[in-house]
Amino acid sequence: MQDTSFAIHPGTKKQLVGENYKEIGGFKSYSINNNIVSFITENGYVNITLYNTNTIRITMNPYREPIVKQSFAVIAETVEIVTNVSENDDEITIQTDEFLVKVKKIPFRVSVFDKHGMAIVEEQTKGMAFNEAGELICYKKMEANDHFYGFGEKTGFLDKRGEKMVMWNTDVYAPHNPETDALYQSIPFFLTLREGTAHGIFFDNTGRTQFDLRSEVDSYSFKAESGQLDYYIFVGPTLKEVLGQYTTLTGTMPIPPKWALGYHQSRYSYETEEEVRALANHFLEKKIPLDAIYLDIHYMNGYRVFTFDHDRFPTPKALIEDLKKAGIKTVPIVDPGVKEDPEYPIYQEGVRNDQFCKYIEGNIYYGDVWPGNSAFPDFTSTKVRKWWGEKHKYYTDLGIEGIWNDMNEPAIFNETKTMDVKVIHENDGDPKTHRELHNLYGFFMGESTYEGMKQLLHGKRPFLLTRAGYAGVQRYASVWTGDNRSFWEHLQLALPMCMNLGMSGVAFCGPDVGGFAHDTNGELLIRWTQFGTFTPYFRNHSAINTLRQEPWSFGEDVEGLVKKYIEQRYVWLPHLYTLFRQASQTGVPVMRPLVLEYPTDENTFNLSDQFMIGDNVIVAPIMTPTTNHRVVYLPEGNWVNYWTEEMLIGNKHHLVEAPIDILPIFIKEGTIIPHGTIKQSTAIPEDEITYHIYLGDKTEASYRLYEDDGTTFRYESGDTFEQEVTCEKDGKTISISVKESNGTYDPTWSKETFVLHHCEGDLEVMVNGEEIPKSNMVFDETTKTLKISTQR
Ligand code: GLC
């Protein structure tokens, strides 16, 4: 066709995606409207919103005044703050008490400084730009010593410097390797650590975005395929404060029901009621703790959501009730795809009430998923979310309190792995294409499910697990990291992945323990379960046609060790629950990279194979086969080996013995850790709390334990219990004080035990001013621990 007009077809013009960026050009004018300073430049419009005392929002639109409406990720309203705007020939300066924004006029560059004038985020050679393909990009200066954390669910190591990452929720069955960066979740938020201080950026764009921390030596960029540039800068100045600022904007996790923190067992699939009952009985007979069993897609009638297959599951209500009596909750999977079947009520309702995603021309979008040809609820519409949420009455009527959302990227079995990007979402009267809203689909499904369940459970806390999500997903769901494999490499991968999810607001996360696809083996299952003891979310799940991986699948020895670490989960639960409460208040995660606690220690900057639980416990799993030792880095201070009581000095790497029964754990001196008791499930009330006191060379330690009923939202109105335990040493006298405060909740335990580590047997112990008689104390000469029993 080269001899027709096709030769000059506009499509032969150079492809613009990823190139030919045009800067927004020099400054033309500015105006102030409350807390928004608006700029007009030669080629665009920029708004700088002083969002609150520590957050600045920057929006850029090349074509019109920036759109002020935010995505659903953002829940915090902007707060009026005192500002002082001044102008000279070169720049406009916006000064507040906490930060300073300087806008250079030509070329137009926006930079943010802290109140002392130290640069936080700077634009230098390149600033904000766009191209004719509708892409928008923004460059920021990168210092030689900048380290990057967050970015949600990503493969690779902890520090993301040198990475290039795409955000586009994707069902990746395989592979999960260093170059697979678009996974199920998209959380376009990161923290930069620079010389011990930190700031953060949240790039609120729900279409495909890309972060490039690789291509240029002294700058990084983030870009979007559609929409406008819309990002928030959090001024820190600590990593924890940035997490607080980000989760103030996007929300924190509500405290989960306690049963959600227990051990969970899953399989794709437990296919019949009989099999599920036998499974539960196995756990009970073997006295292996268990809080939940999952029902994967086989429970449904032809994979129709909101149904049971009555041949396989003849009496679901009785099953769920019986399991509940045994302390086990049932969590069914619910995918978004609704089978195209004119005789299926959910499909009928969806079509009749116009609830499904459609093309602009009005025809429903269909995609192939487990049930075959399926329609997809348009969760961007409040009306649809309400409808879907209410449908969960089907499950709550059966006694179900937890739901597992899967395939909600949405995953579709086609080349692109997802919905046609041309589909139009209703978006509450502001229609947008799937291309623009893709990353929100799972998030919205989560909102719909969680809020629906919350209504239906009348005051009980729902549990929701989701595969896909966007920034703010923590408000509704916990996240598991999708279809990993039973590879040692995937165990290794799970540490930085979960630590960075935690650094992205998602405190409640974890991988499939044992690995999902591929066959696991006994050794891997033990090592993975050891790690799982301390992942915020703890579920063993495996795929169809793989070797079974329930705790007893590899013989008695393996079972014994897997059981031991599942039991440890319950022992550590009072501490974990206290940390979950903290995360729900502050956004600081339960499972933490060491850098969060030791941000000036360069050994922690990219430490990807060990982590912390709270601020004083280090966990260093074994993640290679036939390995009985590993190197552990301990930061400043002295640390006690949890199993051997050996005291190790910090600021040093240690070679630590870790035979198959040992998960290396280290407690910092000057720490108190509460322990609960081993129990079949969290349904059994705690009857004893033991405070392990590791004073080491310190003379004082304290701990503030949190407890509530573990099941309702009454904690929100003060039905809580907090106990502050302080231990002081003065020569041969140990004084323990126990103060209860804050709230009306009366805990279930009556026994309180204190175990002093690293001590001699000739101590005098006072509890709340009263001397403890020797008859209430037991000294163990070999471990050098003194056990003191008291009643609450
Ligand atoms: C997806 C999920 C997996 C589930 C399977 C069948 O692959 O990621 O967890 O078991 O679908 O529902």
Image (cartoon, helix red, strand yellow):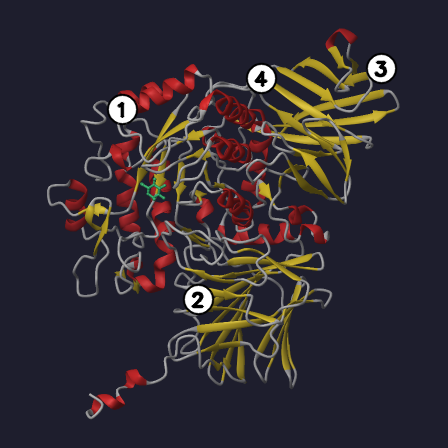
Do tag 4 and tag 2 residues touch (Cβ < 8 Å)? no
Mark positioned earlier in the residue sequence (2 or 1) = 2
Q: Residues within 10 Å of mark 4 (few under 14, many from 20)?
A: some
Q: CA distance from mark 1 to mark 3?
A: 59 Å
User: In what quadrant of the picture does the N terminus appear?
Assistant: bottom left
Mark positioned earlier in the residue sequence (4 or 2) = 2
Given the current orientation, which residue lies at the most extreme right position? 731
Which mark is drawn over residue 762?
3
Which mark is drawn over residue 68?
2
Q: CA distance from mark 4 to mark 2?
A: 52 Å
Q: CA distance from mark 3 to mark 4?
A: 29 Å
Q: CA distance from mark 4 to mark 1?
A: 36 Å
Residue drawn at point x = 63 percent, y = 34 percent: 628
Circle 4 residue: 749
x, y percent for residue 13: 33, 85
Given the current orientation, which residue lies at the most extreme front position? 626
The quarter of the image that holds ligand 1 is: top left
Regarding residue 557, the answer to whether it shows in the image is yes
Element class at badge 3: loop
Element class at badge 4: loop
Depth check, mark 2 against mark 1: the one in front is: 1
Circle 1 residue: 273
Image position of 284 (left or right of 316):
right
Front position in the image: 321 or 669: 669
Q: Is residue 477 above or below residue 157?
A: above
Mark positioned earlier in the residue sequence (3 or 2) = 2
Front position in the image: 740 or 546: 546
